Image: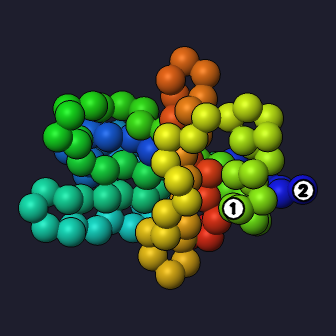
């Protein structure tokens, strides 16, 4: 049986740096990293009491706020099979993002996407 743990919250903002500054000022969130990928592709990682907050620039669809939350697993293939066996509907198959990170998305209640991931930043 795959093991699960909470991993992160992913937010979208028209100004990720300004949004990150809010969480830093108001709640003493610690800045882990801020990366500019060019063309406005800024991604900021914060940590607030052990919780990772990932903030990226608003997508072309204009969505702001909560994009998804992430659940980490130790075995993505096993987790996907178990979740499908329980009736979960996946909106994205297992995808390798980089050598250390693979993800998949399941459709949660109230249309909140849940990223199930193996690897990545801890």
Q: How is the image coloured?
A: rainbow
Between 119 and 30, which is closer to the camera in this rendering? 119
**Up-down: is 67 above or below 95?**
above
Q: Which residue is mark 1?
A: 76
Residue 81 is left or right of residue 71, and the answer is right
Gap in angstroms between the C-alphas marked 1 and 2:
11 Å
Mark 2: give few (<14), some (14-19) or many (20+) Cα within 10 Å. Answer: few
**Up-down: is 90 above or below 54?**
above
* On-image quarter of the C terminus: bottom right
Name the mark on residue 1: 2
In this orientation, does residue 48 appear?
no
Q: Please report whichever mark, 1 or 2, sits nearer to the chain's N-terminal start.
A: 2
Mark 1: give few (<14), some (14-19) or many (20+) Cα within 10 Å. Answer: many
Provide the secondary structure element on which disc 1 rests.
helix
In this orientation, does residue 75 appear?
yes
- Which residue sits furthest bottom? 99
């Amino acid at each position: 049986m795959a093991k699960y743990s909470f991993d992160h919250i992913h937010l979208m903002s028209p100004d990720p740096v300004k949004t990150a500054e809010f969480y830093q000022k108001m709640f003493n969130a610690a800045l882990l990293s801020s990366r500019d990928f060019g063309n406005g592709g800024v991604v900021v990682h914060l940590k607030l009491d052990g919780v990772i907050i990932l903030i990226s620039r608003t997508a072309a669809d204009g969505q702001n706020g909560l994009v998804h939350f992430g659940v980490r697993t130790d075995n993505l293939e096993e987790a996907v099979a178990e979740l499908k066996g329980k009736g979960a509907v996946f909106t994205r198959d297992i995808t390798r993002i980089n050598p250390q990170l693979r993800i998949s998305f399941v459709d949660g209640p109230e249309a909140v996407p849940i990223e199930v991931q193996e690897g990545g930043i801890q």
